[in-house]
Image (cartoon, rainbow, N blue to C red):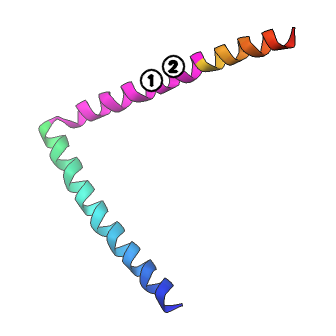
């Protein structure tokens, strides 16, 4: 019981420390204008994943049609 309480407290402390560091990093990137680069890169990655999934869905649909016949 004591071990789980200590583990919970440790996780909470690490979460608070990490969130403060991330906020500083985001503020720094925003002030330098680099946050837009991060946004563009993430948007590109998600667009690529979405496109891949659409193409894969179409291929699987064609294979299922051929398999039915």
Q: Of helix, strand and loop, which one carries label 1?
A: helix
- Image: magenta residue range: 33-55
**Residue at which label 1 appears:** 47
Residue 23 picture location, percent across and down: 25, 55
Instruction: Judge whether 63 appears above or below 32 on screen.
Output: above
**Is 25 or 48 nearer to us in this picture?**
48
User: Is residue 34 covered in magenta?
Assistant: yes
* Residue beneath the point at 42% across and 85% down: 6
Label 2 sits on residue: 51
| Residue 55 image offset from top left, x and y in percent | 58, 16
The quadrant the N terminus occupies is bottom right
- The answer to which of 19 and 69 lies nearer the viewer is 69
Q: Residue at x 18, y 35 (%)?
A: 34
Tags 1 and 2 in contact by the CB under 8 Å rule? yes
Residue 48 is left or right of residue 18, and the answer is right
Q: Residues within 10 Å of mark 1 (few under 14, many from 20)?
A: few
């Amino acid at each position: 019981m004591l071990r789980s309480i200590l583990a919970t407290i440790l996780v909470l402390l690490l979460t608070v420390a990490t969130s403060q560091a991330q906020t500083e990093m985001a503020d720094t990137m925003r002030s330098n204008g680099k946050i837009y680069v991060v946004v563009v890169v993430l948007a590109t990655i998600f667009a690529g994943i979405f496109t891949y999934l659409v193409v894969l869905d179409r291929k699987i649909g064609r294979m299922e049609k051929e398999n039915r016949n």
